[in-house]
Amino acid sequence: MMTLNTLKHLLAAGVLAATLSPAMADAPVDHPVIKRPYKLAPSADLVYSIKARQRGIALSGESVSNWRAGDGKYSLLAETKAALFGKILEQRSEGMVDDYGLAPAQFVEKRFRKDAVTTTFKRDSKTIVFGEGDESYPLKGGEQDRNSAVWQLASVARAAPEKFVPGSEWAFFVAGAHDAEPWTFKVVKEETVATGMGEVAAIHLVKAPPPDKKGQQVDLWLAPSLEWYPVKVTFADADGGDYVEQTLQKIVKK
């Protein structure tokens, strides 16, 4: 998923890339462990268009998510390309499926002109460790990475769509390239989203920054009529103006 904080960081360096920004691990974090019914979405390739604005600069690109699930395993490969730069980001999540749903084994992020960074979910020692830094977190059940989290949320929604009503909240513990933090998605309402396949009804959810931290707001739209696939994602700064918008253009079932 294209994101805003990395967009800022890499624009300052003269290049463009994308990933959800890590949380600071300087204080204890909540670690939600919630076992919910789930139903994985069918395997598919999803193609998104990307628009962004940073410091008055307009940017565009394309992102493709290759989602595969079956035989007790899953994999998710997301590649993002930007005009003038070519491929600027590759993120891969893969693992098993357990009683909680998606159970990542490894999350790999490769940014433009940078070495790949790997986050490992060590099931034997029940810890999450990172290729960069000394932080580690316990594995208690249901943890996700930044690629798998949205797909786990969609899986939960597919199993219990009647519970995704305005005001309902859905918490997960999510690891990135350097550390981990709790994410809570809150359902706003059903809205119409213009996609490359026409207008579709979608459930709008918001992941706001924690109350004691500054950060970007993430808005997510899941479409019940399209297997609850994510049809739109936006990332916006709290002070307004800068944003990244990712909109579904087509789906290729696999």
Image: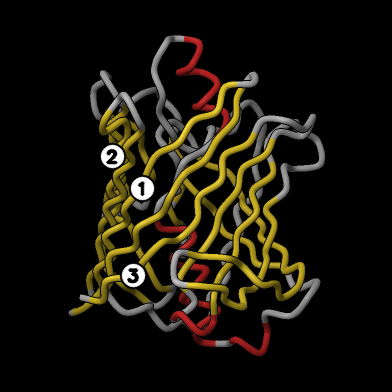
**Nearest the eye: 22 or 64:** 64
Q: Measured along the vertical axis of the image, is residue 175 above or below residue 46? A: above
Please tell me which residue lies in front, 4 or 135.
4
> Left or right of 231: which side holds 88?
left
Mark 1 neighbour density, 10 Å: few (under 14) some (14–19) many (20 or more): many
Q: According to the image, label 3 marks what residue? A: 251
Residue shown at 45% from the left, 18% from the top: 10
Place residue 47 in its image quadrant: bottom left
- Number of residue marks: 3
Q: Quarter of the image holding residue 188? A: bottom right
* Up-down relation of residue 116 to residue 204 (above or below): above
Q: Point out the tag, 1 or 3, that comes first from the N-terminus.
A: 1
Would you say 76 lies left or right of 179 here?
A: left
Q: Nearer the viewer, mark 1 or mark 2?
A: 1
At a point 63% along the width and 36% down the height, the residue shown is 243
Residue at image mark 1:
63
Q: Pick whichever, 183 or 219, lies toward us.
A: 219
Q: Name the spot of residue 208 as percent of width and height, x first.
A: 72, 48
Distance from the alpha carbon under mark 3 to that under mark 2: 19 Å
Considering the numbered disc 2 on the image, is that residue within a helix, a strand or a loop? strand
Give the residue at x 79% y 29%: 239
Q: What is the quadrant of the C terminus in the image? A: bottom left
Q: Secondary structure at mark 1?
A: strand
Q: How far from the left and from the top, in percent, is residue 7?
A: 50, 26
Task: Point out the tag, 3 or 2, that comes first from the N-terminus.
Answer: 2
Answer few, some or many: residues within 10 Å of disc 2's Cα (few below 14, many 20 plus, some between 14 and 19): many
- Disc 2 target residue: 90
Residue 127: give x, y in percent of width and height.
38, 46
